[in-house]
Structure formats: C-alpha cells, structure tokens
Image (cartoon, helix red, strand yellow):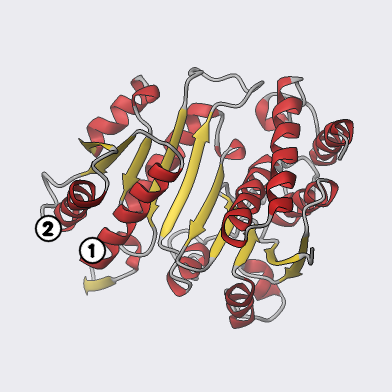
Amino acid sequence: MNPFEVVLIPGDGIGPEVTDAASRILEAAGAPLVFQVHHAGLSALEQGQEVLPESTVDAIRHCGVALKGPCTTPVGDGFTSVNVQLRQRLNLFAAVRPVRNLMGVSTRFDDVDLVIVRENTEGLYSGVENQVTPDVVMSMKVATETACERIARWGFRFATRRDRKKITVFHKANIMKLTDGLFLRCARQVHQDEYPNIEFEEVIIDAGCMKLVQDPSQFDVLLLENLYGDVVSDLCAGLVGGLGVVPGANIGEDLAVFEAVHGSAPDIAGQGVANPLAVTMSSVMMLNHIADTRENLACREAGDRIKHAYNLALNEGCLTRDLGGDLDTSQFVAALIDRMEAQGT
C-alpha cells in the first residue's frame, strides 16, 4: 500500500519538539504516512513568508489532511490567529475535541467521557470589529442559518456513528435571541426532522458550566457555537488533566487539520521537556480519520497501537513533568515505542 501524504506544520515554541516526537511515534507504529513539511505562524514569518503562506494552504488542499503543532497568537495586537485563518480559508467548520479520563492521570473526576463539537467559522470569531469612536469599539457576532444547520447536522451524525446517546446544546438564547436563538432553533429542527433517535437537551451556558464542574458524567456530546465551544472545551480539558492530554481536530467536507490544542509555551521551548501526548493523541484521531475516509486499514491498526501504548505507559507511571512525573520529551517517546515493540510492532 502506498503511503498517505500528510502536511506537517511544526508550529512555534514547543511545536517542532512535540510534532517531531509524534512523527517518531507514528513511524514506530508503522503508520503508512509521508510528511510534507510546511510552515505557519512565527516560524513562517522568520523565513520571510506570510504568517499563513499560500503554499501551506495549497498543500493541505492537495493532501486533504494535516497535523499541526501550536502556533503563537499575539495578544491585543499583531496578526490574526493562524488557527482562525486556517479554519475560515479551508472551511473547517467542525472543531471536535474528545475529553476523557486517562489511566494514570489523577483528577477530581474519574468518569469523564465527553465530546465537544464546536462551530468553527463564525460567531464573534468572524473578526468583524470596528472602532466606532476613539473610546468605543464594537465586535459583531455573526450567525448564518447555513452554518448553524451544518454544524448541528454534523454533530448529530457524529453522535449516531459513534453510538453516543445524547447531545446537549449550550446557548445564551435567553439574552442573544437572534444569534444564539438561530443556533438553537437549527439544532432543534435537525433533531426533530432527522435524528429523533438521539436524546436532545438545551442548557443555558452559564448554568451548563456549573453543571459540568459539578458532575461531568451527566453530559455526552456538547454542541456549541464558536466562542462558547472554545471556552468550554478548555474547561473540560481541565477536568481530565489539562490541555496536554486532550486532542483536537478541525474538519470540513473534504479537508481536516488535527492539532495539539495547547499553546506554544515559549517559556519551555528548546528544553526538551514538553509533553507530546496531545499532538500524539491528535495523530491517532488523524489516523482514524484517514481509515474512515480512505478505507486505510493500516492507519487504523497503527492508531490502535499508539493508543494502547500511551494508555499502558500512563497507567504504569510514565508521566512528563506537567503531569507530575519526571520524564522529558524523548523519554516519554521512548516509553511509548518500547511498549509498541513489546506488542510486536
């Protein structure tokens, strides 16, 4: 079987370290991939390119799949988020973040198994901001029926395929009656007309956040607009150990970008201590996506090997420093490869 071409975006800060680690794990697992390296973010600017080079966008369109490290986003000024640009230019409308407890990672809850499905292209992240007067600025929240229906339908289809039982919409339609009202009405309609088999629930977002930290086991799949999905997905990551143990994907009709959802952590860049687990877990999501969309059994098998290896390693106490252990990046990679070799990989 010919290897599958995948774009690799190393990213900034610890990005090159964790994506290199994931690449070594993928190779050890026998994943039939060949990487095309392209840049975005500060690393692209340092090479004299635009923050999101057209060559990087074109490569993703050509390959259909990318694995991405974290890219730095300036706070308060500077260039627009690379992540937002990628999602909008490639129409990656569904952000998907599974959040579950991992063996060996101690948290306050031991029964977390959630999936956050977030609309990824509009809302307040549309970037429509104006200076009204010298001391007044305005940001516009954009909602379209097309995008609201699309993400609702995608979420219900995902829940059905993954044998999930319930979708909960987090909203603020009691206050934002037009934008959040549209999002909520579209979700209701898709449920009623197409997926009555899935249990459906509506929760105002502030009450929903309280309920999450009281008892996350009462939720299954969460469906949210863009800003809410961003905030709630990080909140949920905190229930299971933080952003270092949670994978993420941005999926469109024909394209998908899988990424570590944590930041670029420039304060520890180059020290060899970054946790590569999040991007490794994202690479497993990528392998499963390729297996589903390209009928590539070898990718599924490689993903299963990696998942079994990191579950085993974590359960046996192989933890990086952010999780309370003492392993550096290379030692964690070695722990996973050792366990894959013991499986007969």
Looking at the image, tell me whether mark 1 or mark 2 is earlier in sequence order.
1
Q: Position of residue 106 (x, y in %)?
A: 60, 19
Residue 120 quadrant: bottom left
Residue 14 is at least partly visible in this image: no
Q: Which mark is residue 143?
A: 1
**Residue name at image x 72 percent, y 45 percent:** 301
Q: Is residue 326 left or right of residue 45?
A: right
Kind of element beneath mark 2: loop
Mark 1 nearby-residue class (10 Å; few <14, some 14–19, many ≥20): many
Q: How many marks?
A: 2
Residue 280 quadrant: top right
Mark 2 nearby-residue class (10 Å; few <14, some 14–19, many ≥20): few
Q: Quadrant of the N terminus?
A: bottom right
**Residue name at image x 40 percent, y 62 percent:** 93
Q: Is residue 316 above or below residue 198?
A: above
Q: Are marks 1 and 2 in contact (CB under 8 Å)?
A: yes
Residue bearing mark 2: 178
- Three-letter amino acid code of the residue under disc 2: Leu
Q: Position of residue 218 (x, y in %)?
A: 34, 24
